[in-house]
Every structure is written in C-alpha cells, then in structure tokens.
C-alpha cells in the first residue's frame, strides 16, 4: 500500500501558478516526490516554456508529519520546511519570494519529502508561485 496523494492545479496563468497537494499517509511517507513539474505548466504568451518558479506563498495544514519542500537538482536543496501539527500561512512576496538556489543539475521543479510520517498522518499544502521562462 502507498500513501494516498493528490496534486491539483488550481490556476496556471502566464505569470502565476497555484497548486494544491494532499497526502494521507499509510506510514511509508514520501521521499523527494515530484510535485511541481515546470515543463507541464503553460507557456508564456510568446510560446516560451516555463523553466522555474518562485514560491510567493505557502498555505499548509499538517497533522502528525512535517514536509520538506525541495528544489530539484543533482543534490536537492531545501526551499522550506513545513512543521508537523499545525495550520500555517507564509507570505514571501514582500521580498520577492523563495527563489531557487539549487546548484548543479537544477531543473526548476519542486519535490516534497515527508518527515515523521506514520499511518493516518496528513498534509494539505497550497503553493502560490510566480513562473519564469527560458
């Protein structure tokens, strides 16, 4: 059996993307699971492909487990850590958002790793992101 997870695109415009992710754990958890595949986001009006995102806001609710939000690269880099057992809203837009500082092999994608997941633990996370183009 595996964790019951969902990924939902709430909005995918030229400048912004908003996505929602949920997990009900069976105790196995997630390890660097791809959540935001920038190549699947819509292109710019001029046809340029999305090559990355900046995280402007995170809305999260967790019960029993935390979540590490990661920038995908040869060695993933932690973008933000969502603690266990709480409801949170963080707004990073006042300083330009959380920008991808991953090094070699940086893809622009976002991955999640759960921390301390046991059976019945849950998370719901909404990411508000500003898109960038190649």
Image (tube, grey):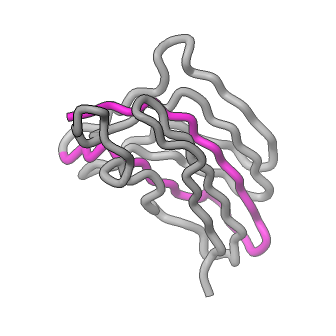
Q: Is residue 40 above or below residue 23?
A: above
How many marks can you see? 0
Relative to the observer, which residue lies in front, 121 or 130?
Answer: 130
Residue located farthest toward the top when viewing the structure as drawn: 94
Quarter assignment of residue 14: top left
Q: Is residue 133 magenta?
A: yes
Quarter containing the C terminus: top left
Residue at 43% over, 59% down: 34
Q: Which secondary structure class fits the magenta region best?
A: strand
Percent position (x, y) of residue 10?
60, 47
> In this image, 118 relative to 70: left or right?
right
Residue 24 x/y as whole percent: 72, 69
Residue 78 x %, y %: 45, 41
Q: Residue at position x 39%, y 35% from top?
A: 53
Q: Which residues are magenta?
A: 105-134
Indicate the quadrant containing the N terminus: top left, top right, bottom left or bottom right.
bottom right
Q: Can you tell which quarter of the image residue 15 is in?
A: top left
Q: Residue furthest bottom?
A: 1
């Amino acid at each position: 059996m595996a964790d019951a997870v969902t990924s939902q695109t709430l909005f995918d415009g030229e400048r912004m993307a908003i996505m929602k992710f949920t997990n009900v754990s069976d105790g196995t958890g997630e390890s660097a699971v791809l959540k935001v595949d920038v190549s699947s986001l819509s292109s710019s009006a001029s046809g340029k492909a999305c090559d990355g995102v900046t995280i402007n806001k995170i809305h999260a609710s967790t019960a029993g487990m935390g979540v590490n939000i990661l920038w995908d690269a040869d060695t993933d880099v932690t973008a933000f850590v969502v603690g266990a057992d709480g409801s949170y809203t963080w707004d990073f837009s006042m300083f330009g958002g959380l920008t991808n500082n991953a090094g070699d092999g940086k893809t622009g994608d976002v991955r999640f790793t759960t921390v301390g997941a046991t059976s019945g633990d849950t998370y719901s996370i909404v990411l508000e992101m500003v898109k960038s183009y190649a």
